Image (cartoon, rainbow, N blue to C red):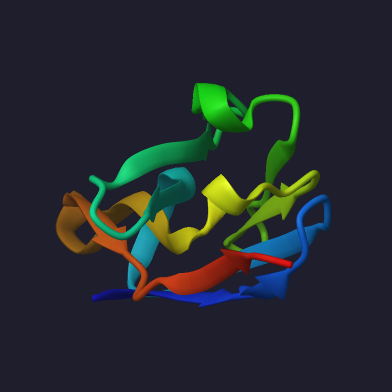
Amino acid sequence: QVQLAESGGGLVQPGGSLRLSCTASGRLFSIITMGWYRQAPGKERELVATITNGGTLTSGDSVKGRFTISRDNEKRTVYLQMDSLKPEDTAVYYCYADVIGSWARRSEYWGQGTQVTVSS
């Protein structure tokens, strides 16, 4: 089993910054992709940004130029630096990982979510 532990959410004023972290632990051989999705009240979960073990980045249009994703493969950790935050960025942010685990089985995992609130 694989666990994803998120941290870094909170309340911030518009224009401010936050940094989210997510660390994977458990029985895994390698992590193919790690990243973040978010879900605002009454809306579907949407892509924020992902990064593969080869460094390929994917991000949602609404966060391009403001959010930066990075990962530390040795620490099994992915980071999301969020700058120039807007009220519409308010959501629960979920960590995501696509991993090769026990018995060479490929599986997807989600964190429990961390709340980000952008408000004055």
Residue 82 position within the rendered picture, expressed as x and y whole percent measured from the top left: 72, 50
Q: Residue at x 40, y 71 (%)?
A: 113
Residue 56 placement: quadrant: top right
**Between residues 45 and 71, which one lies in front from this camera angle?**
45
The residue shown at (52%, 37%) is 49
Quadrant for residue 75, please give it: bottom right
Q: Nearer the viewer, residue 107 or 59?
A: 59
Find residue 39 and report its horizontal and vertical position in percent: 34, 54
Q: Position of residue 43 (x, y in %)?
A: 26, 48
The vertical placement of 51 against 71, above or below, is: above
Residue 40 shows up from this direction: yes
Whether residue 75 appears in this view of the structure is no
Question: Which quadrant is the N terminus positioned in?
Answer: bottom left
Q: Count all numbered tags in the image, as a single digit.
A: 0
Q: Residue 62 location, x and y as percent?
A: 55, 28
Compared to residue 23, the image places residue 83 above or below, namely: above
Measured along the vertical axis of the image, is residue 98 above or below residue 103? above
Looking at the image, which residue sits at the far front?
A: 120
User: What residue is at 67 percent from the left and 56 percent from the top?
Assistant: 79
Task: Report the front residue among 91 and 79.
Answer: 91
State the quadrant of the C terminus: bottom right
